[in-house]
Image (cartoon, rainbow, N blue to C red):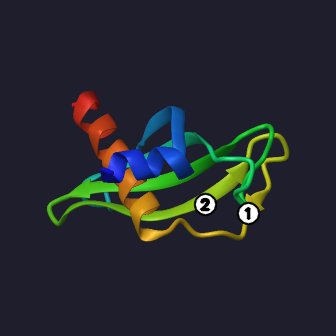
């Protein structure tokens, strides 16, 4: 089973919104993006929500490379930030998805 197949069992990306953040003062290096990655998880998962979830990602691309600065998992209906972390594989999946989005923006 590939990593992608395992991920699809636990976390499915169903959409996104992306916004490049402006630095009006020019103090920050590189480009920063706020990306909302919309996901669903199986009913048996402790993160499950009927209205769905999104992962709010602050993503940076600069001379040091590309990375996730931080993220929050948010319940769609209530906008409540959930006190959960993605596991390594899930975070890698979100990172790769965001990286592909940024590449398409360029």
For residue 43, side relative to residue 26 (left or right): right
Residue 59 position, x and y percent, is: 39, 54
Instruction: Of the two numbered discs 2 and 1 on the same chain, state the one appearing first in sequence.
Output: 2
Name of the residue lying farthest toward the right: 78
- The location of residue 87, given as percent across then percent down, is 49, 69
Query: Horizontally, is 22 left or right of 61 in the view?
Result: right
Q: Is residue 24 visible?
A: no
Which residue occupies the foreground of this view, 26 or 30?
A: 30
Near-viewer residue (42 or 27): 42
The residue tagged 1 is 82
Estimate the spatial distance between the alpha carbons at disc 2 and disc 1, rounded to whole Å: 7 Å
- In the displayed image of the protein, which residue is found farthest to the front? 1
- Residue plotted at (31% across, 49% down): 96
| Mark 1 neighbour class, 10 Å CA radius: few under 14, some 14 to 19, many 20 or more | few
Q: Quadrant of residue 68?
A: bottom left
Q: Circle 2 sits in a helix, a strand or a loop, which is it?
A: strand
Return the x and y of residue 61 as percentages of the image width and height: 26, 54
Q: Which residue is mark 2?
A: 72
What residue is rendered at 74% in x and 62% in y?
46
Whether the residues at callouts 2 and 1 have beta carbons within 8 Å, the answer is yes
Secondary structure of the residue carrying tag 1 is strand
């Amino acid at each position: 089973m590939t990593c992608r197949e395992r991920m699809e069992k636990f976390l499915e990306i169903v959409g996104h919104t992306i916004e490049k953040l402006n630095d009006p003062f020019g103090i920050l290096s590189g480009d920063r993006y706020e990306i909302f990655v919309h996901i669903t998880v199986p009913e048996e998962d402790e993160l499950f929500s009927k209205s769905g979830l999104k992962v709010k990602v602050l993503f940076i691309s600069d001379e040091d490379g590309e990375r996730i600065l931080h993220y929050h998992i948010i319940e769609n209906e209530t906008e409540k930030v959930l006190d959960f972390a993605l596991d390594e594989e899930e975070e890698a999946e979100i990172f790769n998805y965001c990286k592909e989005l940024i590449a398409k923006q360029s």
